[in-house]
Image: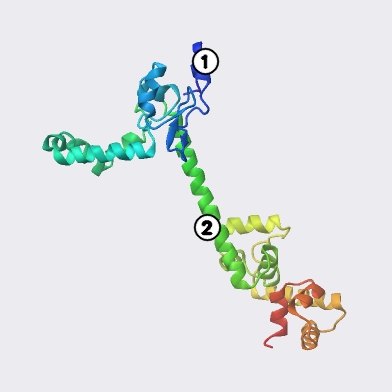
């Protein structure tokens, strides 16, 4: 349903947000789309605007099942209805069909189907959208927390260092790197690309290839510091008091790479 256009009396143009029931949580009231005032029972108030509660919901794109009342007012009504229900066998018999629908799930299906005719209510679409967005945000937050835990467990200072230490220097495969960093393979590929790290073609993770790349990396690090044997150079500097961070900076390698070549201390 499209938002209502401004018409006679400007009633349709004064609502603050079409398709959303607006609450003042501090005052525990529901705001009227027409006059902007807050009420505990909006359904009763809208009569002064020559509308029934059903017409008000239709006018402003709200779910047909949406209570037009404050939380406390709704709770009071619920308690009163429950007391009347418990005190009346006739009421229990009258509502038996609805209770059966609730147990089977039919009541929920009808509620979320909007009006059951035509297109869904605008509020229903918003509720579904917001629910999906909230789920995606939760999944993203949980994934980020898993990655942060993996970085801490591996002793990495940041994500780029971890990617280079595990995938580049450690010569791990995409699958192994993803497992170590607790991310999915597709996300890992996106992270590698975002940090300017080329993904190796398939077949470059063999033991022979890894050993060859290890020798090349060691040779490049040795040339950088002017040493013949990078492992010997690192052990000597460590014995003289150099920290792993300092040695990593000198060789342009990661701290885990340096620690692996120094060995047990």
Q: Which residue is mark 2?
A: 142
Q: Note whether residue 176 is visible.
A: no
Q: Residues within 10 Å of mark 2 (few under 14, many from 20)?
A: few
- For the residue pair 14 and 94, the one nearer the viewer reads as 14
Colour convention: rainbow
Tell me where residue 45 appears, x and y as whole percent. Answer: 38, 24
Q: Is residue 186 left or right of residue 250?
A: left
Horizontal arrangement in the rendering, residue 18 relative to residue 172 (left or right): left
Quarter residue 44 falls in? top left
The residue at the point 34 percent across, 36 percent down is 73
Q: Is residue 25 above or below residue 32?
A: below
* Residue matched to label 1: 10
Residue shown at 16% from the left, 35% from the top: 91
> Dots 1 and 2: beta carbons under 8 Å?
no
Q: Which x, y percent locates residue 195?
A: 71, 58
What percent of the width, then of the height, locates residue 169? 70, 71
232 above or below 3?
below
């Amino acid at each position: 349903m499209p938002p209502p256009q401004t018409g006679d009396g400007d009633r349709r143009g004064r609502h603050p947000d079409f398709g959303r029931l607006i609450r003042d949580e501090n005052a525990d009231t529901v705001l009227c789309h027409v006059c902007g005032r807050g009420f505990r029972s909006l359904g009763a108030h809208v009569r002064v605007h020559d509308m029934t509660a059903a017409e008000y919901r239709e006018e402003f794109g709200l779910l047909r099942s949406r209570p037009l009342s404050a939380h406390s007012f709704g709770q009071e009504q619920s308690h009163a209805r429950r007391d009347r229900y418990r005190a009346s066998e006739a009421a229990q018999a009258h509502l038996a069909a609805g209770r059966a629908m609730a147990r089977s799930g039919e009541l929920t299906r009808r509620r979320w189907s909007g009006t059951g005719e035509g297109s869904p209510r605008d509020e229903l679409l918003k509720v579904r959208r917001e629910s999906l967005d909230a789920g995606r945000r939760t999944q993203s937050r949980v994934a980020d927390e898993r990655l942060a835990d993996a970085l801490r467990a591996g002793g990495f200072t940041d994500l780029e260092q971890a990617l280079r230490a595990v995938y580049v220097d450690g010569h791990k495969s995409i699958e192994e790197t993803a497992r170590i960093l607790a991310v999915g393979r597709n996300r890992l590929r996106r992270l590698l690309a975002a940090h300017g790290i080329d993904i190796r073609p398939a077949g470059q993770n063999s033991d022979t290839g890894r050993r060859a790349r290890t020798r090349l990396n060691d040779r490049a690090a040795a040339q950088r510091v002017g040493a013949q044997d990078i492992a010997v150079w690192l052990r000597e500097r460590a014995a003289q008091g150099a920290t792993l961070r300092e040695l990593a900076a000198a060789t342009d390698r990661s701290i885990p790479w340096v620690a692996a070549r120094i060995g047990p201390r």
